[in-house]
Amino acid sequence: MGTRERITFTSLPFLRGIEAVSGEDVTNVFGKHIHATCIVGRVQKGVRMISHDGDEVRIPCGDLFVVNPGLVHACTSGEGGAHSYALLSIASSVLARVASQISERAEPGVWFEGVHRTHGMISRRLGDFFEMLSDPLSPSFEKESHLYTLLAEIVLAFAQAPPEVCRVGRQQGAMARVRSYIQAHHDAPISLASLSDVACLSPFHLQRLFTFHYGISPHRYVTHYRIAEARKLLVKGAAIGDAALATGFSDQSHLTRHFKRVVGTTPGRFIQANRS
């Protein structure tokens, strides 16, 4: 019986230069080839075998593989079965930009040593990111923020010469501006890029400092603030759908999902409880 082999390619509009690729039940043998980009992937199921420079490397389920641009290699499933994977194809310019944001100085580029990596946190974050991509209710801001964090962690953990994290001070004023901007624009689309412009900081340092100051990441703060504003509208008698659109959620389902996650109950039950 044949497998249901499927490979999906997804461009990321919120960060150019990166493509997300997921393969399910793959049995195809990829002969010797090279990539113009860096490949960072996670084996989701089964075993992936990567051959390069005369060596054959076994990547088991849950582990990571990293392939530098220009490396001649071949890939196949291991142990006689299909395997599934999720990978990011990352332009070298993107990695150099992330490294430069971390150090706050021009970095020449990022290079990785070895193909097989074991890193529980990065593996989980990569898997979580692909779950977000497949979820139509996952907001673009959350995906963007998660991806920037993931890229920084990859560079710091795996680069041959990781950049030194620059000390940028506490930046109380910048963080206050970002929080005020979120509160004033919570009913409109918000991006990590727009918040970085408000703070005059890179996305890496913005997320790091905002979390330090307020104990929560920018994208989570946006969600919690929107939920708080939606609660006020619901108490005043607004319909759930109207409250969703008025507070920056795409629709009623989007609000309901995050409302239950934050408040612990659905908007409908919240309304009933406040009317009794």
Image: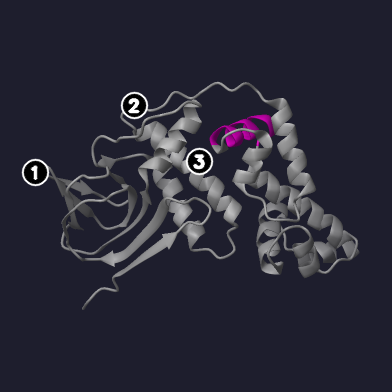
The amino acid on which the numbered mark 2 sits, given as a three-letter code, is Ala
Residue marked by disc 1: 54
* Percent coordinates x, y for residue 113 in the rendering: 25, 34
Pointers 1 and 2 in contact (C-beta within 8 Å): no
Q: Residues within 10 Å of mark 1 (few under 14, many from 20)?
A: few
**Nearer mark to the viewer, of 2 and 3:** 2
- Which element is circle 2 on? loop
Q: Residues within 10 Å of mark 2 (few under 14, many from 20)?
A: some
Query: Mark 2 sits on what residue?
Result: 161
The span from disc 2 to disc 3 (Cα, nearest Å) is 19 Å
Q: Which residue is mark 3?
A: 149
Query: Where 209 falls versus 44 (above or below)?
Result: above
View extreme (bottom): residue? 1
Label annotation for residue 209 = none
Kind of element beneath mark 1: loop
Instruction: Report how far apart the C-alphas of labels 1 and 2 lie in the structure.
Output: 25 Å
Q: Main secondary structure of the magenta part?
A: helix
Magenta residue span: 204-215
- Residue drawn where x is 40% and y is 55% of the image: 19
Q: CA distance from mark 1 to mark 3?
A: 34 Å
